[in-house]
Amino acid sequence: MGRALDPKKIKSAQRALEVLEYFNSERGEATVMDIARAMGYPQSSTSELLSCLVSLGYLHRDRYERKYRPAARVALLGAWVQPKLFREGSVLPMMDQLAESTGLTVTLATRVELQVQFVHEVRGKISPNHRSFDHKETLLLHSAAGKALMSKLDRELVKKYVHRLNAESDPEMRVPYQELSDDLDKVREDGFALGVDDDGGAMIAMLIPQADDFEQLAIGIWGPAQLLSKDTALYVEQVRAAITRNLEPQILDAPTAMNENEERMRPAM
């Protein structure tokens, strides 16, 4: 029998990752108290954790200002993952360019089991509120990014997802499978998904063509619902043009890899 995991070690690992994710382009450095307040951690354990990350080479500490900032090792952590998109590619610069040209918030999303996780965002100047997507999660069935990510999955697998999510959701949040299947047919035909939320925002999301089928990603632009609903075709064209212009030709030849991924994800009969 395997050893039971130590809850204290699990919590420490979680906090270490949350600290590294805390830093971004808008929060390049922080004090112990900044991080403790933001994360709701005790000051003493936060200080110990930061000191440990410094000793491991993931954070740098300015002894005079008593501030911490990510070290170069953080930038290299996982740089080998999907190299055609990140290390050798232009996904992150593309997101910066889209945010600048459209004025909208640009997101990068992936599927984590039954949820959509927004792993990176670049905030635009135009937005209906100050929502932050970075590292946030939402249910797979209730977002444009989720529908884009599901659009190429085998429908029997989608049906299982719907059944499980509906069983765990309140009645008003349940989604009929056939309704979702029709939506996914349209997403697959159009090449994008459009979703409107309850607080006046909307998102247009589409898959990023990939030569590596390890993990499917979706790019999204988010802004006022009135704006995206009115000029949907214009924004879709801007995102498509950005993908074509920035991603390498071998990445754009990815449909074969995606089709193989579909077959591998097909449930056994």
Image: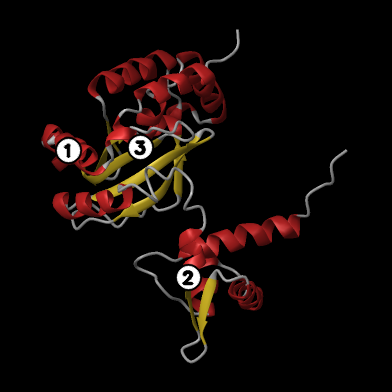
SS type, badge 1: helix
| Side (left or right) of 177 relative to 92 | right
Q: Residue furthest bottom?
A: 64
Numbered label tally = 3
**Quadrant into which the N terminus falls:** top right
**Quadrant into which the C terminus falls:** top right
Instruction: Give the answer, above or below, for where 49 lies relative to 233.
Output: below
Q: What kind of residue is marked 2? A: Pro
Determine if residue 196 is in view: yes
Camera-side residue: 214 or 182?
A: 214
- What residue appears at the point 46 percent right and 76 percent down from the top-left corner? 30
User: For the residues marked 2 and 1, what is the alpha-carbon distance in whole angstroms?
Assistant: 33 Å
Q: Position of residue 4 (x, y in %)?
A: 82, 47
- What residue appears at the point 21 percent right and 37 percent down from the top-left corner? 244
Determine if residue 200 is in view: no
| Side (left or right) of 36 relative to 155 | right
